[in-house]
Amino acid sequence: MTEPESSHDGEDKAILSGFITKAEIAQELGVSERTVERWVRLRLLPQPLKMGRSSLFHREALKEHLLARMEQASSRSSCARRRRRG
């Protein structure tokens, strides 16, 4: 049995549904695409998957990375507050 071609199109979209483009990240964060590129170079964002000229970021990995950075920042600021008091 063969499946109709239309179901393969849906499968392709499902495969890429977990990824976000550099332009989409820039729009969501309110910055330019060049800023996103710079943040990748500075390792403030995870490395994208390169597909030809396109850069695709795994949405969940990006989310986890940003949450981890937020936790690091909050722990640093709480440590700094303790040092000032002590």
Image (spheres, rainbow, N blue to C red):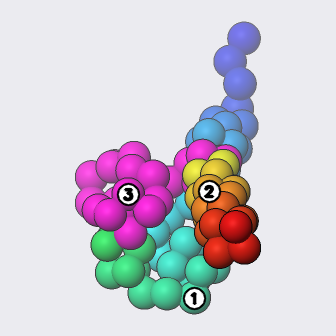
Amino acid on which the number 2 mark rests in the picture? Gln
Q: Is residue 62 above or below residue 42?
A: above
The residue wearing badge 1 is 30
Which range of residues does the magenta coloring cover?
39-63
Q: Residue at x 59, y 52 (%)?
A: 65
Residue 54 at x, y = what percent?
A: 35, 60
Verify CB contact (< 8 Å) between mark 1 and mark 2: no
What number of labels is visible?
A: 3
**Residue 20 or residue 86, whichever sits in front:** 86
Q: Is residue 3 left or right of residue 72?
A: right
The residue wearing badge 3 is 43
- Is tag 1's residue or tag 2's residue first in the polypeptide sequence? 1
* Residue 56 seen in render: no
- Is tag 3's residue or tag 1's residue first in the polypeptide sequence? 1
Amino acid on which the number 3 mark rests in the picture? Arg
Amino acid on which the number 1 mark rests in the picture? Gly
Residue 15 at x, y = what percent?
A: 62, 40
- Is tag 2's residue or tag 3's residue first in the polypeptide sequence? 3
How many C-alpha atoms fall within 10 Å of the one at disc 1: few (<14), some, or many (≥20)? few
Q: Residue at x 46, y 60 (%)?
A: 45
Verify CB contact (< 8 Å) between mark 3 and mark 1: no
